[in-house]
Amino acid sequence: MARMKFLCDADRCIECNACVTACKNEHEVPWGINRRRVVTLNDGKPGERSVSMACMHCTDAPCAAVCPVNCFYTTADAVVLHSKDLCIGCGYCFYACPFGAPQYPRVGNFGSRGKMDKCTYCAGGPEADFSTIEYEKYGSNRLAEGKLPLCAEMCSTKALLAGDGEMIAQIYKERVIKRGYGSGAWGWKTAYRETVAI
Amino acid sequence: MRRGLTLFRTIVVAAALAASAPAMAQQTKDGLNPTGQNPTADSVNEEFLFKQDPKIVGRVTIPDGKAASLIQPQGRDYRAFRESWLPWIGGLAVLGAIALLAGFYLWRGRIKLERGPDSGKKILRFGTFERVTHWMTSSCFIILSLSGLNYIFGKRLLAPVIGPDAFAVVSQYAKYAHIYLAWPFMLGIALMFVVWLKDNIPNRIDWHWIKAGGGLIGNGHPHAERFNAGQKMVFWMVVGFGTAMSVTGLMMIFPFVLTDITGMQVMQVVHSLIGVVFIAGILAHIYIGSVGMEGAYDAMGSGKVDLGWARSHHDLWVEKEIGKVDHGTRRPVRPVPAE
């Protein structure tokens, strides 16, 4: 089984936000929820870089550890998913998540946040694959169809890479060697406790 | 004519670009862009940004300001506190308090009501308003404690017994209880502060009470006014911790209104740490007000206590109260005969 990861090549990301839009459309994500977002660093200054960020599907995920009802589980592909039936919307996963991935339909509304929503790596949820209820709660299940997450699939500059960790690290390494520079695999040290050595 | 000119211009520009393309490619081959600068030389990278700040924050084009925080590795510290430290601290505080009280009970036993010349007569200690306030706050406190402890220990103790689905339902209602009962609790803290502040100002008598061991250790009865030093400590603990719990709790009920992710983590840590110590303190309060001392419960139960008990535990207060009646200056607090 693969160990699925995301890698955003910030030297290629042009902050077009197509990954964000594709994700919203593919999963019919409601208003106010961003499973993926693009953050621009050093905005307007020399060396500006943009990073597309979503749930990194961490090794030993902090969200899963702090959850008071243990609603998280990790799939055989190392994708971190959760059950909206068990989630009580306490918000702890957002405090623990290094990447700000967990989203709530009603943040700030008297603590009644609603069921947490986050990037599923286009892998659905605990319900049966391709069922209506799975789509309604978690969005489409592309992984079960043999496809990779849509955000990375349709990235115009191929900045966002998704797939087996070793494979995408290899692709990134080759790029860096060929072009002679690279600002690194953003978030990898925090998410996977390793980085892409070049 | 005009269209032809535009087309010509486009072709010229395209040809010029095509001609310069190999030159650009030539320059980028050795890591340089057309301006002659190495693009990595001034590009931001994670290592550099983490040296400046423990978290990486940028700019986002969506209205959700929290999304601008790209990486906050301190989430792992929050996790370490919540999962590695808090269960031990909380367990130790609550079970430790129970063990200490059990030990005290075995050593001291129930403090008996001493029969005096006034025993059998009753004196009003807490009026209806005071008792309603106390029980509103305390019943909220009990539910808040249990639902609060559920956040820490529920998945470890309750979930294995009743199963994950039932536990999720229980936890959902516990969360609602925790959030909504916080409001009458906060009201109760405020009311108790106003009602009992004047009787809880520390003074010299308290110092003597503490030096005499408060009558808990030994058998003497040091002088005390309406509240002895121990009760004053409970009052100030409830007011202090209650305020701290209210402030940190409100910050969590309205997340990210006044603070950022770091602030939210700090609020959680403070709320949980004070919470478990508060529970331990209140366990001692419950003990001495119920099984620990004969006659003490009546003060908050019926509101009327045995005059003999009052004379031995709150002598100065009784003198004052009876004095008031004798001079007919205030509400009737005269000793009423036992039914």
Image: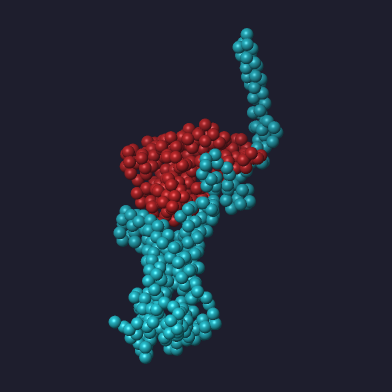
Chain colours: A red, B cyan
Query: Is residue A134 at least partly visible in the picture?
Result: yes
**Can you say which quadrant of the picture contains the C terminus of chain A?**
top right
Position of B157 compared to B315: left or right? left
Examine the rendered structure and indicate whether residue B158 appears above or below residue A18: below
Number of numbered callouts drawn = 0
Q: Residue at x 37, y 63 (%)?
A: B143
Position of residue A180 measured from the top left corner of the image (x, y, whole percent): 63, 37
Query: Is residue B156 at least partly visible in the picture?
Result: no
Camera-nearest residue between A43 and A184: A43
Position of residue B335 measured from the top left corner of the image (x, y, whole percent): 37, 83
> Which residue is outermost to the front?
B328
Position of B190 compared to A39: left or right? left
Residue B176 found in image quarter: bottom left
Position of residue A119 measured from the top left corner of the image (x, y, whole percent): 44, 43
> Which residue is outermost to the bottom?
B117
**Can you say which quadrant of the picture contains the N terminus of chain A?**
top left
Position of A131 compared to B67: left or right? left
Q: Residue at x 45, y 48 (%)?
A: A107
Examine the rendered structure and indicate whether residue B311 appears above or below residue B251: below
Examine the rendered structure and indicate whether residue A62 appears above or below residue B311: above
Position of residue B5 measured from the top left corner of the image (x, y, whole percent): 64, 12
Q: Residue at x 40, y 83 (%)?
A: B310
> Which residue is outermost to the left?
B339
Q: Residue at x 50, y 84 (%)?
A: B209
> Which residue is outermost to the top?
B1
